[in-house]
């Protein structure tokens, strides 16, 4: 939570402490790790058997789509994975066509930079989640420098589509065993976060941070539940659990953290979903359910409106990737797309996060180059050893990257180097030298571009978020004081206000990380958040969801 004292400094300090600190692994770290192996292995082993490993780059394009959407409910995951495959194939098509029409490295780098900017903007606007645009950019940039003719493009795209279809099947397969797994995890996170806030009683040490974390977790749980389509009985039970998390967020002093954590534990595995106390008729139950139905029927924001605020980030990406590629070409590096991809991987929500990612990328890549030196002799024993080494590195990358980006990069770097040898083995020393130079060039030039392209819109977005929160709060307050509110109006107003509170915090955190930015209205933000949470508590009391029996069920 921000302090109530406004910030007057325009230059933000760039952190060094903690940038490489390892975090806890994700609850589902093994899912993307196993999925990518299951998606990559059959196409690569088939090509190995056919003696055509030179085509592996095109099947890898489709196979790597299995990395996406693991936190999404299966109905939403099916749509997201389909769009990822289409986006991957689309970027690959542009790259292959450009590569077949020109041999100008400058033109190819320019095309790669524009593709990277478009991929970054669309991935951020759609909130596709990790690994974001980086994998898409890696495939399209590498394809720009792959030799080929225009007549070969359809066949190469067909390989990518076939592997992408298999990746879609791999991503959807767990739904046959645990169809509500993602929603259960999201609800469990919300319950645990609400319990952590309840333990502060709303006033203890760290209560502000715990409240922001709980609000974000509850909002994420609702997003998960509202993206699943049909409201089945298990989903309705999960909705009621999230309502209990919201009640704890509104009135932490009366919530039982132990009960919330017990429900979260029961959501693990495949056991029955716990059934909390169901409020009596007339005390908010109908309003709650109608409110959810109303939100399901509300239209989503158009994609173009979500792309607009991302223009500075897209410009940073295009400029940084292009300049990194040009510098790499000027230095005579044979694979300028590595510098381009390094620059593309840096760009986060603000300059501070971009700086941290740059440090992580450089450290991870340099250690990864040393790892390649140790792995290369084994991988060079034969094509089968090469394929198996890549599969092991795929698993390691996804298993470790959740703890810190640099740790995952230790596996990603040798894997990327080995992929370049699918067509033919190359001199390890040359590969390692090119990779080190491209990493340093991409990180340095990419960060300079991030600093040069200031995000003046970050401050404006705070003002818009403040206005949206105030409007939502006023609407909720009027609904609370209405003698006979429309059915579902209280719940809809509460959901709108909760989303506005979370959006204001995310917008403020993003703006606070900009290196060169006007003073932020931190006192207004704090007061607006406090007023928003008070109004949320009032809506809970007005709905009758806050009852002694309900809070202690």
Image: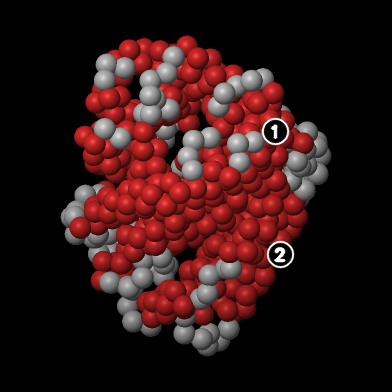
Q: Is residue 111 above or below residue 466?
A: above
Left or right, residue 506 beside residue 403: right
Residue at which label 2 appears: 467
Q: Please identify the quadrant where the N terminus is shown.
A: top right
Residue at position x 38%, y 29% from top? 423
Q: Position of residue 419 (x, y in %)?
A: 39, 29
Q: Is residue 331 above or below residue 351?
A: above
Q: Assign a secondary structure to mark 1.
A: helix
Front one among 327 and 134:
327
Please state, as top left, top right, bottom left or bottom right, where the C terminus lies in the image.
Answer: bottom left
Instruction: Identify the residue shown where x is 64% and y is 25%.
Output: 328
At 58% across and 79% down in the image, what residue appears? 479
Left-right relation of 54 to 466: left
Residue 254 % position (x, y): 42, 57
N-term mark: 1 or 2:
1
Q: Secondary structure at mark 2?
A: helix
Local packing at callout 2 (Cα closer than 10 Å; few below 14, some 14-19, many 20+) is: some
The answer to whether one can see residue 109 in this image is: no
Residue denoted by label 1? 323
């Amino acid at each position: 939570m921000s302090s109530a004292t406004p910030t007057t400094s325009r230059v933000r300090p760039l952190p060094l402490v903690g940038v490489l600190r390892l975090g806890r692994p994700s609850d589902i770290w093994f899912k993307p790790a196993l999925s990518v192996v299951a998606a990559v292995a059959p196409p690569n082993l088939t090509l190995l058997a056919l003696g055509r490993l030179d085509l592996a780059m095109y099947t890898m394009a489709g196979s790597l789509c299995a990395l996406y959407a693991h936190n999404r409910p299966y109905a939403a995951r099916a749509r997201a994975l389909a769009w990822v495959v289409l986006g991957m194939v689309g970027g690959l098509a542009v790259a292959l066509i450009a590569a077949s029409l020109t041999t100008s490295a400058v033109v190819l780098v320019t095309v790669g930079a524009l593709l990277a900017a478009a991929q970054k903007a669309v991935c951020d606007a759609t909130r596709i989640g990790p690994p974001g645009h980086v994998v898409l950019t890696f495939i399209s940039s590498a394809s720009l420098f792959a030799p080929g003719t225009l007549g070969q493009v359809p066949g190469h795209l067909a390989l990518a589509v076939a592997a992408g279809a298999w990746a879609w099947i791999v991503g959807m397969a767990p739904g046959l065993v645990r169809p509500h797994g993602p929603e259960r995890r999201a609800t469990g996170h919300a319950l645990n976060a609400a319990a952590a806030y309840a333990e502060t009683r709303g006033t203890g040490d760290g209560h502000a941070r715990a409240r922001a974390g709980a609000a974000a977790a509850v909002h994420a749980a609702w997003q998960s539940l509202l993206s699943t389509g049909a409201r089945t009985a298990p989903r309705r039970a999960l909705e009621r659990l999230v309502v209990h998390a919201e009640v704890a967020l509104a009135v932490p002093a009366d919530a039982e953290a132990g009960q919330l954590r017990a429900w979260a534990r029961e959501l693990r595995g495949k056991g029955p979903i716990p059934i909390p106390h169901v409020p009596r008729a007339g005390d908010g139950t109908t309003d709650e359910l109608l409110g959810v139905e109303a939100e399901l029927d509300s239209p989503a924001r158009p994609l173009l409106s979500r792309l607009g605020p991302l223009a500075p980030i897209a410009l940073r990406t295009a400029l940084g990737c292009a300049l990194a590629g040009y510098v790499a070409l000027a230095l005579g590096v044979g694979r300028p797309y590595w510098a381009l991809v390094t620059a593309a991987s840096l760009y986060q929500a603000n300059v501070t996060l971009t700086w941290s990612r740059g440090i992580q990328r450089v450290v991870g890549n340099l250690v990864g180059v040393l790892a390649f030196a140790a792995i290369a002799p084994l991988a060079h024993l034969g094509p089968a050893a090469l394929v198996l080494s890549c599969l092991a590195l795929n698993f390691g990358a996804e298993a470790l990257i959740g703890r810190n980006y640099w740790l995952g990069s230790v596996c990603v770097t040798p894997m990327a180097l080995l992929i370049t040898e699918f067509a033919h083995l190359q001199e390890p020393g040359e590969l390692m030298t090119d990779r080190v130079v491209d990493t340093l060039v991409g990180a340095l030039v990419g960060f300079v571009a991030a600093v040069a392209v200031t995000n003046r819109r970050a401050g404006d977005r705070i003002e818009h978020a403040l206005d949206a929160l105030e409007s939502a709060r006023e609407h909720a307050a009027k609904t609370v004081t209405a003698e006979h509110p429309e059915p579902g109006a209280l719940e809809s107003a509460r959901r709108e206000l909760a989303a506005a509170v979370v959006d204001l915090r995310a917008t403020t955190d993003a703006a606070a990380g900009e290196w060169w930015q006007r003073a932020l209205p931190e006192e207004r933000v704090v007061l607006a958040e406090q007023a928003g949470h008070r109004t949320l508590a009032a809506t809970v009391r007005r709905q009758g969801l806050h009852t002694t029996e309900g809070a202690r069920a």
